[in-house]
Image: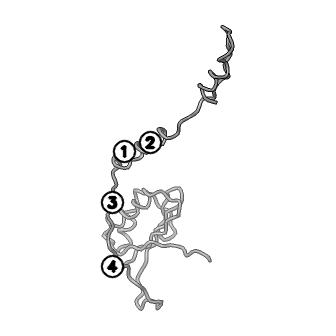
Amino acid sequence: MSWLDNKLQYRGQFSLGVRSIPVEPEINLIPFIDVLLVVLIFLMISTTFTRYQELAITLPTANGAASQSELKQIHIAVSRDGRFAINGKVTDRSQLSNSLNVLNKDNAIQVNIDADAKAPHQAVMSALEAARDANLSNIVFSSQTTKK
């Protein structure tokens, strides 16, 4: 019911206290949608899009044949709480480089770093630094295959 219909209904009556029927308020959605579209356009224009640079790397393939030469290996184990062991003997971080220097008698040594999946990153980096300090460059990280 519009306002004009309400006035026409009471036209013939003479009363000072005329009660009108309350009109329900309406929400006009068109200006609301217009404002939201303007905000959306503003956000789209003001957002900066960054591109991540990627390196084009072709990964090597490996055959299933075993290697012919046997290399002497040093196993550095890094535990979950950041402790180290070289070939099964627990060692301190400060003695890690010295122990690797003692074991590095020839250059044909391969260093296997067996780090726990939850080992701190700093502990693994300490093992790499100790291998670098001992002039060991053939470093391999051990991993476990997933069961299917």
Which residue is under mark 2?
34
**Amino acid type at mark 4:** Asp
The mark lying in front, picked from 4 and 3, is 3
Circle 1 — which element? Answer: helix
Mark 3–mark 1 distance (CA, rounded to whole Å)? 21 Å
User: Residue at the spot x=54%, y=73% of the render?
Assistant: 144
Mark 1–mark 4 distance (CA, rounded to whole Å)? 66 Å
Which residue is under mark 4?
106
Circle 3 — which element? Answer: loop
Residue 19 spot, x, y in % from top left: 68, 16
Residue 83 spot, x, y in % from top left: 50, 58
Which residue is under mark 1?
42
Residues at circles 3 and 1 in contact by the CB criterion of under 8 Å: no
**Amino acid type at mark 1:** Phe
Mark 1, other Cα within 10 Å: few <14 / some 14–19 / many ≥20: few
Residues at circles 4 and 3 in contact by the CB criterion of under 8 Å: no
Circle 4 — which element? Answer: loop
Q: Which mark is residue 89?
A: none
Circle 2 — which element? Answer: helix
